[in-house]
Amino acid sequence: MSTTIILLCIIAFFAGFVDAIVGGGGLIQTPAGLILLPNNSVAQVIGSLKIPSFTGTFFAARTYLKKIKIPFKRLLIFTSIAFAASFTGSYCLTLVSNRFMKPVILLVLILVAIYTFTKKNFGQETNNQNLNFPWYKGALICLALGFYDGFIGPGAGSLLVLAFISWLGFDFLQANAHAKVVNLATNLGSIVLFTIKGSILWPIAIPMAICNAIGGMIGSRVALARGNGFIRTVFLIVIMATLCRLGYDVFLH
């Protein structure tokens, strides 16, 4: 068991690093958790992995917010909606299968990858200089992707980044800062639900959380130092990895 925990902690570090830059850390953690913890239920594995996801996102968000300022009112609205939506999504996950959604998400991500790859200036500059937008647009993003994160999960952070860029006109750094705060709320919503259900393996979740947090702090600092071009490259890599993972689930698994 100690070897398993060490492997999971190493994986959690890299997941936190990638997630801080552009989201998608769950693509690294979730398959590893399911493979390395075969004797535990899926609910226990997924519930336990939400703890390191939360801590890594927390420290990444804190680093981003030191440089990227988000109005408190916007923060409160976005996180409240995301929390409630994620809690609801995780509850629905305990009732029904989410397999029917995977082909839909696969198609969406293929379009995302094509669009990002061909549109070279995507997310490289802020199209909305004052970052003013109808509040309902941000609320809809948090509602839809909050539910998605609680119900399905893979690539939620990357989809948040995409939504904030394409619909609200943010650049990658602004989008990342907002995505981290929203993702923090979605993780917390799921954690509350899985805690109520008694599905979290704390002896595994806590050491993974520490490693994920360290990865998150380092990753966010690298992203801030390297800028939008670097984040765009990592974004494309993570989207392609998501496509491969979901493609395997849909066609082969």
Image (spheres, rainbow, N blue to C red):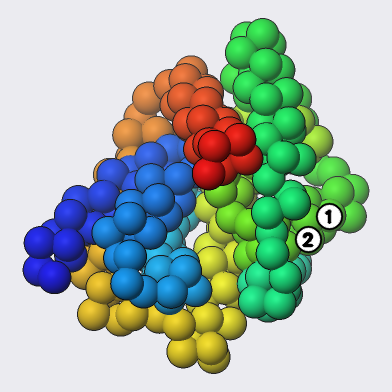
Q: Which amino acid does the dot numbered 1 rest on? A: Leu
Residue 216 vs residue 177, the one in the foreground: 216
Write down the quadrant of residue 56 in the picture: bottom left
Q: Is residue 105 left or right of residue 57?
A: right
Q: Residues within 10 Å of mark 2 (few under 14, many from 20)?
A: many
Mark 1 — residue?
Answer: 140
Q: Is residue 33 visible?
A: yes
Mark 2 — residue?
Answer: 143
Residue at the spot x=76%, y=40% of the render? 104
Residue at the spot x=51%, y=31% of the render? 244
Element on which disc 2 rests:
helix
Q: Position of residue 249 (x, y in %)?
A: 56, 43
Label 2–label 1 contact, CB within 8 A: yes
**Alpha-carbon span between mark 2 and mark 1:** 5 Å
Q: Is residue 242 left or right of residue 213?
A: right
Q: Which amino acid does the dot numbered 2 rest on? A: Leu
Residue 8 vs residue 38, the one in the foreground: 38
- Mark number displayed over residue 227: none
Q: Residues within 10 Å of mark 1 (few under 14, many from 20)?
A: some
Element on which disc 1 rests:
helix
Residue at the spot x=71%, y=77% of the render? 95
Q: Is residue 175 visible?
A: no
